[in-house]
Every structure is written in C-alpha cells, then in structure tokens.
Image: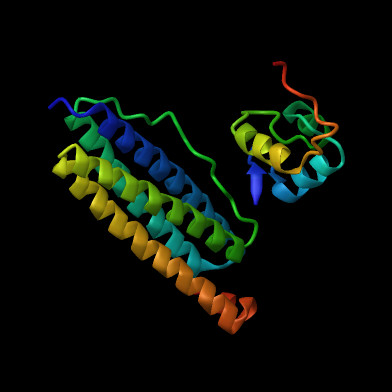
Amino acid sequence: MQGDAQVIEILNDVLTAELTSINQYFVDAKMLANWGYERLGEHYHDESIDEMKDADALIERILYLDGVPNLQRLGTVRVGEDPVEKINLALDLERESIVRLNGGIAVCVERADNGTRELLEHILEGEETHADWLETQLTLVDQLGAANYLAQQLH
Amino acid sequence: MYVCSCRGVTDRTIRATIQGGAETVEEIGRRCGAGTRCGGCWPVLDELIDRLADPATRPQPAA
C-alpha cells in the first residue's frame, strides 16, 4: 500500500532512534556485566532486545507502506563511563524518543493513518515505561547513595 | 561519556582539548585522537566546539 511520504519519514526517524537505542543498551549491558553489575546488565540487555522488536515492527510497517527502511543511519551512541551515567544517558534517549513519538502520532492523526498511529502508540507506551524505570533508579541512587544502590545490582 | 568509540576518547578529554585551543575537528584529532577513524562522532565534536570554543579565536567558515 502506498503510504504518505511524511509518515514514512517519521517511521524511518523512529527506526533510526530504535537502532541507536539497541546499540547503546547492548554495549551498556556488556560493560555492566563486565564490571560485575550482572543484574543491571541483564535489564539493559532486555531493553536492547525490546528495542529490536520495535525496530522489527517499524521495518515491517515501512515496507507495508512501500517505503525503504533505512538501516544505514544511526544516531549518536552515548556510552556512559559508569553505571549511574549510563542511567542518565538512557533517560535522555528515552525522553527524546517520547517527544519524537508524540510528534509522529500527531502527524498520523492528521494524515488519517491509524495503523501507523497505533504502532507508534504501542512503542510510546514501552518507552514511557522504560523512562519511568530509569527515573526510579535515579531516585534510588539519590536516596540510597550510589554505593548502596550499586550493591543491589550485582546479582 | 565516551564520544569517540574508535579511539576510546571521553567528552572530558575532548572538552579539555577544545579549551586548550583545538577549535576544529581535525585539530582535536591531532591532539587527542578523537574522530580520526570512522568519523561517526564528528557531529558531537562540532557540537562541543560550538559550545566551548572561544568565538574570538575560532576560524570562521568561508562566507
């Protein structure tokens, strides 16, 4: 089905962000595990896989709309040097995603592309849940201190 | 944060390099190695130059 050009562009922009997140969270997961923070690393690993599932659905949607999925383009992978910096950088990424997705959903409504709107809404809910989890971790770091928080991330 | 993954250079090193007078991507590369391989971090280097370099001494792009 021939899709609206602007909607396809939005889908590709969201895809770029997902591909960036996959890589950022994957390298974060491996670094965290290497430092011994197995529990936090596992969470990052699962987040990376979730982003890959989003990328899967986006690529399918772009192809359905007769667009070309862009897997060439990648945003800046922001690799934190310690666990708390990684959480802050992940939250930056998620907050940017939420703004991008809400903007994309508005365009889908305007262009009456409810299939894409529904997909973006589903992805948005996932990103909001992740942002909420990250905010909780930062609150815990504040309340417990970094050392106490990190002691809970070993196993 | 690691800005240049190829050479493992952090934003702190790059900020210090810019504040030490490196005001182009090429000069940053010469001094600390960042951005001398794949070039994927150039947009971030440009952003840091814009934010930190002294406007008085920074080479102006040709009009």
Q: Classify residue A121 as left or right of residue A90.
A: left
At horizontal 39% and vertical 57% (from top left) the residue drawn is A47
Residue at far top of view = B63
Extreme residue toward the left, this view: A1
Query: From the viewer's perspective, is residue A97 above or below residue A63?
Result: below
Q: Is residue B27 above or below residue A108?
A: above
| In the image, residue A95 above or below residue B3 | below
Q: Is residue A154 visible?
A: no
Q: Position of residue A143 (x, y in %)?
A: 57, 83
- Between A100 and B11, the residue placed more toward the observer is A100
Kindly indicate the quadrant of the structure image that contains residue B43.
top right
Q: Nearer the viewer, residue B30 or A8?
A: A8
Q: Which residue lies at the image location 24% right of the left edge and 53% below the top edge?
A: A121
Residue B16 x, y percent position in the rendering: 81, 46
Camera-nearest residue between A18 and B55: B55
The residue shown at (64%, 32%) is B42
Q: Is residue A50 visible from the viewing direction of this image?
A: yes
- Taking the spot 16% from the left edge, 39% from the top edge, the residue there is A113
Q: Name the side, left or right, on which A16 lies relative to B34.
A: left
State whether residue A143 is above or below residue A3: below
The image position of residue A130, as x and y in percent, is: 39, 62
Quadrant including the N terminus of chain A: top left
Image coordinates of residue B9 in percent, x first then y, are: 71, 43
